[in-house]
Image (cartoon, rainbow, N blue to C red):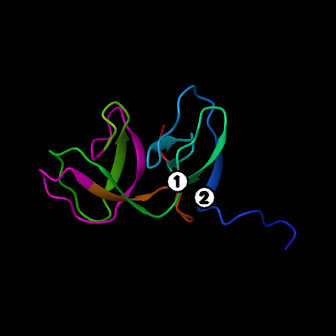
Amino acid sequence: MKTFRQSGHRLDYLNEGSITIASGAVVDIGVWFGIAVANILAGLVGVLEVSGVHELAATAADAWAVGDTLYWDAANLELTDAASGNQEIGKAATNKAAAEVLGQVILNGNPGTSGHNT
């Protein structure tokens, strides 16, 4: 097929910032979020994973169930179930009890899902 370029689960990303994006960092790419597959040096292109289930830091006070909408709290660099002031990142892939500091999210970039709210 002449039109196919890539599967869409990973996308090339130009780090236009002045610092390195660390491997595993959450990156807001406007329509979705991506997770840096490896360090992306300033001014260079790296790869972001934009689909799948990822385990990320999460607000300890929150508890959620599979399928709940999750948001990215950019100020605290963690998942939350609070929409106010945050951007939608995906859906809960597992239940999370209050006091747990990690949560699993299915990223909105996953094929067949919509982008996050801005």
Camera-side residue of 4 and 57: 57
Point out the stretch of residues depicted in magenta: 79-102
Q: How many marks?
A: 2
Amino acid type, label 2? Arg
Quarter placement of the N terminus: bottom right
Q: Position of residue 110 (x, y in %)?
A: 52, 62
User: Secondary structure beneath disc 1?
Assistant: loop
- Which residue is identified by label 2? 10
Task: Tell me which corner region of the image, top left, top right, bottom left or bottom right, holds residue 84.
Answer: top left
Q: Position of residue 25 (x, y in %)?
A: 44, 44
Identify the residue at horizontal 12%, vertical 50% (top origin). Answer: 99
Inspect the magenta stretch and tell me whether residue 2 lies in it: no
Q: Position of residue 102 (x, y in %)?
A: 25, 53
At label 1, counting other C-alpha atoms closer than 10 Å, the crowd grade (few under 14, some 14-19, many 20 or more) is: some
Mark 1 vs mark 2, CA separation in Å: 9 Å
Circles 1 and 2: CB distance less than 8 Å? yes
